[in-house]
Each structure stands twice: as structure tokens, then as C-alpha cells.
Amino acid sequence: MRPAFSVLFLTTLIGIGQGLLVALSVGQWIETIGWAPVDPNGNFIAYGAVVAVVFLGLGLFASFFHLANPQRAWRAATRWRTSWLSREVLLLPVVMGLGLVYALIQYFNVQPALVTFANGESVTLGLVVGTVAALAALLLFVVTGMIYACVKFIREWASAWTVINFMIMGLASGSAVAAICANLEGGVLARFYLFAALVLTVVALATRSYQIWLNSRLALKSTLKTAIGQHHQQIRQISQGFMGSSFNNKEFSAPGGRDAVRGTTVAFLFFAFLLPAALMIVALGHGGLVVLASAAAIQYLGLLVERWAFFAQGQHVQNLYYQGKA
């Protein structure tokens, strides 16, 4: 399939925002149960939630460049009963709204205690709102991944690993940004977020590599024989669907062919996972904010390449007929 650059930015940017919201909520729970000292002013979480909303907003903005008729964008939300895309359109603003409310509660310190533990720590309004925002963000990962995993005739996408990898890569990149925010604000959870980002990056490398291996072993269910209902052993196509360029040739074939897909696969494994993981290890050894920021920036660029390869790897069954132009 031909990747749409607006969708590349949409899925990667909102992935960072979602992962950041989850990281902030987890960090606040760690403080609440006493595993880490409490941030006295809560500004780190407030500013982090604002950053998450900004990433989500940038992703939403990028999505408009994929619309042929932006004035009809509202129609995308009307099929929520059957369409994963409609569910994403509805859920994304909800996550953004929850993230913004979370930021305001933390910044203005509106923290009435709802439940108090034996150790004196309390479940506050901010903690509850943050948890709901994190759960909504996790649900959004599932919804976004299912947009592609439900397309059964593109077998490279039609797998639970599509959803799993969208989620793990988003959590990894979001945790890296959380570590940067915590460092800038002097938060006590900076090393926790950095370690979480490192672990999630390594896990993402393993799960994404496994999906690549599974896809390399896929056997096509549709062939020229099944397409025409003929089981002769010597069937071959001697003319193409179009002798010149057409929509079918452009939109359902990877630019550069299979060689480009293989090349970008090697590239994203290095830039999205291996190199950022190495830089995170250096940062854990007191490598500094610059090293951490470099790791996050390189990882994001690598994830853009990963998403390009994800879409380009998908092989539409129509290519059995609309083969490459002469």
C-alpha cells in the first residue's frame, strides 16, 4: 500500500500523547502508594499533561491533510456502531479533553481526597481523572490499531500484533517524553520514566521483529487460480490491469517496491529501537538531558519510518490484477 504521510504523523504523534498520559498516571499512582516521594507542587504532571494534549492536537491536525473534502470530516463520526475509524474520531477528542482537565486540576491543585489509605496518602480527584484519561488513551491505542487489524484481506495488518505494537511503541515514545518533562521540572520520577522507556523500547523491538517474521511467512490466500476459479498449473497473466499509470497502480503498491520496504525495515529497527535504547542506557548512567532528548527525537524519526514500512508492507489483493505498469 502507498503510505499517506498525514497518517504517519497522525498515528505517531497521538501515540506519544497517549503514552505520555499513561506514564503520568502511572507515576502519580507510584507516588500515591508511597514508592516514590510526592512532587510537592504537582507542576510536573500538569505541564506533562499539557504536552500530551499538544501532541494529540498535532496528530488531529495532521489527519485533516488526508481528507479529500475536509468540510465533510464530521461524517467520519457517524458510523461509530460499525467503524473503528469513527470510534477513533470520537475517542480522540475525549482523550484530549480528559488530558486538559487533568492538567488544570494538577496546576491549580484542586485535590479533594476521595479515599485515604493507611499510610496517609489519598486517592485524589486528580488521580482519578488521570487514571480515566490513561484508560481512555489505552482504549484509543486499541481503536487505532483495529482500524488496520480489521482489514482481513491485507494479511500483513490483520493481526493482534498490529494493535500490540501500536500500543507498545506509543508507550515507549510517551515514556521517553515523560522522562524529558520530569528532568526539566526536577521530578523525582525522571529515572523511572527513563528506565520504563528503555524497557518498552526493547520490548517493542522484540514484538515488532516478531511481526515482521510472521509476515515473511505468510502464504497468499488469493491467487490467480482462486480469482478465476481455475486450477490449471500453468496459469499466467500476459497483460496488466493498466499499461500506464493509474490510481490502482499508485495507491495500492509500495513506492519503490519490495526493495524499499526491506530497506526501510532495517532502518526503522535501528533508528526506532536499537539506537534510542543505546542512548537511553547512556542517559541512565547520568548522560544528561541532551542525550535523553536525542534518544527521544531519534526514536520519533525512526517511528515515522516504521509507520511508513507498516503501510508499505501491506499487499492489497487487487495487485493480482493491477500489476506494475509497463
Image (cartoon, rainbow, N blue to C red):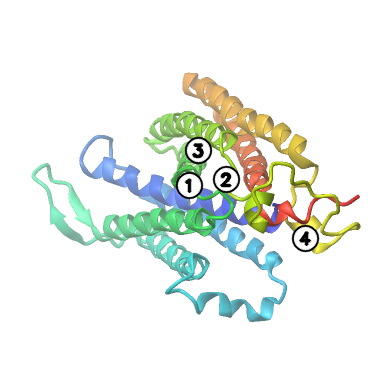
Measured Cα–Cα span from mark 1 to mark 3: 27 Å
Q: Is residue 319 left or right of residue 26?
A: right
- Who comes first in sequence, dot 4 or dot 2? 2
Kindly identify which residue carries mark 4: 248
Q: Is residue 85 left or right of residue 26?
A: right
Image x and y of residue 165, in percent: 49, 42
Kindly identify which residue carries mark 2: 156
Residue drawn at x 45%, y 53% is 141
Measured Cα–Cα span from mark 2 to mark 1: 7 Å
**From where the camera sits, is residue 275 visible?**
yes
- Who comes first in sequence, dot 3 or dot 2? 2
Q: Is residue 107 left or right of residue 287?
A: left
- Secondary structure of the residue carrying tag 3 is helix
- Who comes first in sequence, dot 4 or dot 1? 1
Measured Cα–Cα span from mark 4 to mark 2: 19 Å
- Who comes first in sequence, dot 4 or dot 3? 3
In the rendered structure, which amino acid carries the disc numbered 2? Answer: Glu
Measured Cα–Cα span from mark 4 to mark 1: 25 Å
